[in-house]
Image (cartoon, rainbow, N blue to C red):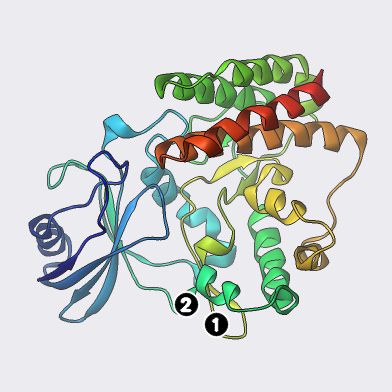
Amino acid sequence: MDFQPKDRPADAFQRSLTADQIELVCRRMLGSSARSAVELGWGGYNTTYRVELADGPVILRVAPEPARQTRIEHEFMRNEYFAAPYFAPIGALLPRTLAADFTHQAIGRDYVLQEVLPGQPGPEMLSAREPAARVPYFHRLGEITRAIHEVRGPGFGLVAGPHFESWSEALVSYFLDNAEDAEDAGLDGADLREVAACASRDADLLDEITEPRLLHGDLWHVNVMLTPELDIVGVFDHDRSWWGDPAADWTVHMASAKPGTERDAFWDTYGRPSSSPEARRRGLYYRARHIGAVRLERQRLGKEGRVEESYPEMAEVLAELA
């Protein structure tokens, strides 16, 4: 087999499989031998390969070892697998899962084999266009995000559970888990605990959100496939999917980040979010949630300087919540 893994430091979070392990997975799950395997480099959590088999290519995605998973990222691959049926409104855009193995008998890690999506990676296509030319992409992204957010769920929290009866309980639990994860990584989690305490005091405000809606959790240009016309023909990596307030979704956060730019086209098809005082205050908790998650990701990727930037960002949120 022609095997092309990424050259990573020995202490990198993402760990490559061996060629023998990839061959074992393909024979075990698909009954086919791998001709080549190329590790793909866009993601920062799972380890992903494009594998060429005798009858065509497949995508192999491999989760981190259980001991390397944090509380807020626990069994993400299983969460994605469980959540897939709820993404039925955009089912034609999702990669079809060919096989999944959560037994840990073969390689000691969860993994899935999926069909290859059409199109080209979003980062490649959008970086080649001037900002003003990206409007069709944001229009389509708004449509897709709205379709996802129309799906109602049984409780608040990760789609696969555990579920909470109230939105405030889900958020408080998340912030406390995030704080423990930060501390396990040698970081200061005190500000996350402060946010949790604020959320507990603001429970009545947060619990004005009574209907859990489906959130993709990570829908942005890095997790889509595009045509040359910037139409979205593939959506993937919904392992962070939650039941919650649509305003808390990563897509809404990112679309809001640069007002007055081409990103405003997102709202043409998605619809304008509420700008009430209550919605703005809830938005502070959603911003804190994103800051805390990104802090851990930066730590995992060895971006120490960017980790430090998250503390004044969180301090701004706490100052507004005071």
Q: Residue at x 78, y 33 (%)?
A: 282
* Mark 2, other Cα within 10 Å: few <14 / some 14–19 / many ≥20: some
* Quadrant in which the N terminus is drawn: bottom left
Sequence-wise, which precedes: disc 1 or disc 2? Answer: 2
Name the foreground residue: 172 vs 121. Answer: 121
Q: Is residue 76 left or right of residue 233?
A: left
The spot of residue 174 in percent (x, y) is 56, 26
Q: Residue at x 49, y 53 (%)?
A: 238
Q: Is residue 183 left or right of residue 22?
A: right
**Could you tell me the amino acid type at mark 2?**
Gln
Is there CB contact under 8 Å for labels 1 and 2?
yes
**Residue underneath mark 2:** 120
Q: Is residue 321 left or right of residue 188?
A: right
Q: Residue at x 47, y 79 (%)?
A: 119
Q: Is residue 289 above or below residue 318?
A: below
Quadrant of the image occupied by residue 213: top right
**Could you tell me the amino acid type at mark 1?**
Thr
Name the foreground residue: 86 vs 167. Answer: 167
The spot of residue 36 in percent (x, y) is 17, 73
The spot of residue 253 in percent (x, y) is 70, 48
Q: Is residue 7 above or below residue 95?
A: above
Q: Is residue 82 above or below residue 157?
A: below
Q: Visible in this render: residue 207?
A: no
Mark 1 residue element: loop
Q: Is residue 106 left or right of residue 78?
A: left
* Mark 1, other Cα within 10 Å: few <14 / some 14–19 / many ≥20: some
Q: Residue at x 71, y 20 (%)?
A: 199
Name the foreground residue: 19 vs 129. Answer: 129
